[in-house]
Image: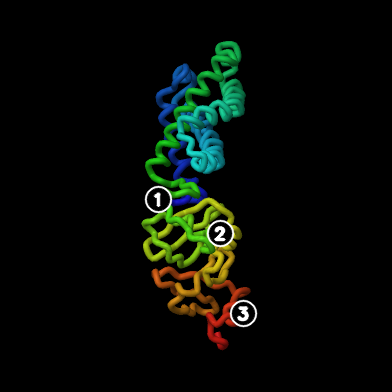
Amino acid sequence: MQSMNTTRAWVIDLSGFAAAGVILGVVGPFGTFLNDALPQRVAYWMCLCLISGVVIGAAVRWTWPPARRRGLPAWAWVPAVAVAITVPLGLLSRVIAIGLWPGVRQAVGWTEWYGQALLVELVLLALYVAAHSRAGWLTGPAAPAMVPVEAGAARILDRLPRRLGRDLLCLQMEDHYVRLHTLEGSVLVLMPFTRAIADVGPIDGLRVHRSWWVARQAVRGVIHDGRNLRLRLTSGLEAPVARARIAELKAAGWLASDV
């Protein structure tokens, strides 16, 4: 799974919206085909689509995780989100359109304009959600076929799907998510990193970096890269060690005293 909360994900998203703007500029829906030359129409629709991309991207990232936790299907929340975001986006698009083509004010009323804007935003939003659902770029905290946790065991293990087993190697923070690594792979979970560390419970391990917690049994070696240190794990992963954590790791016997 890939996170949607990365620069790469946003660049891909906005590139798609820009392409949609080009297509709409060429087609010229709702009478815009008769307004100005092709470059002006394309610029107008690209501007609107890019703004929509930012708003839709933020709305989906905020809405989708809690919807997944509650088991809500896309059709239950996508229309509501479209109706809500069309209010500011419809107003903005009308202001821009009137600035470019003053005759729009008399030609198209507010109700008709909102309806047209809602249709565009609903289509863009639905396509966006469908694309990300197919790509699997967004995952909530729950996963199917979870392994039950015995009394007194680490609560974090309840986040692991059965296919990944129970041998937790490390936790890796990714934006608002935490990636749980085992020898069988990894899963991305929506939760605070500090909460994830608290939930490891009796598993022996340490936070070795701002965004990494490592289980002691997973460490197979230490990599020296100049003044930087990394822990080599049984899975082949390399976890960076923050300088501020070196003394703690030495005291715990993870690192030699002369490191």
Residue at image point 46% right, 30% down: 75
Q: Residue at x 39, y 69 (%)?
A: 235
- Image coordinates of residue 55 in percent, x first then y, are 56, 36
Q: Which SS class for mark 2?
A: helix
Identify the residue position indicated by label 2 in the image. Answer: 196
> How many labels sit on residues?
3
Q: Position of residue 153 (x, y in %)?
A: 51, 63
Q: Nearer the viewer, mark 3 or mark 2?
A: 2
Q: Which residue is mark 3?
A: 247
Q: Nearer the viewer, residue 200 or 211?
A: 200
Looking at the image, which is closer to me, 101 or 236? 236
Name the residue at 59% across, 16% down: 110
Is the residue under label 2 in contact with that under label 1 (CB below 8 Å)? Answer: no
Label 3 close to label 2 by CB (< 8 Å):
no
In the image, what residue type sits under mark 2? Ala
For the C terminus, give its image quadrant: bottom right
Disc 3 secondary structure class: helix
Q: Residues within 10 Å of mark 3 (few under 14, many from 20)?
A: some
Which of the two discs, 1 and 2, sits closer to the camera? 1
Q: Is residue 135 visible?
A: yes
Question: Where residue 161 appears, x then y in whole percent?
Answer: 41, 54
**Cα distance between the residues tagged 3 and 1:** 40 Å
Q: CA distance from mark 3 to mark 2?
A: 23 Å
Q: Residues within 10 Å of mark 1 (few under 14, many from 20)?
A: few
Mark nearer the viewer, 3 or 1: 1
Left or right, residue 182 beside residue 198: left
Disc with the residue nearer the chain's start (3 vs 2): 2
Report which quarter residue 251 is drawn in. Answer: bottom right
Q: Which residue is mark 1?
A: 145
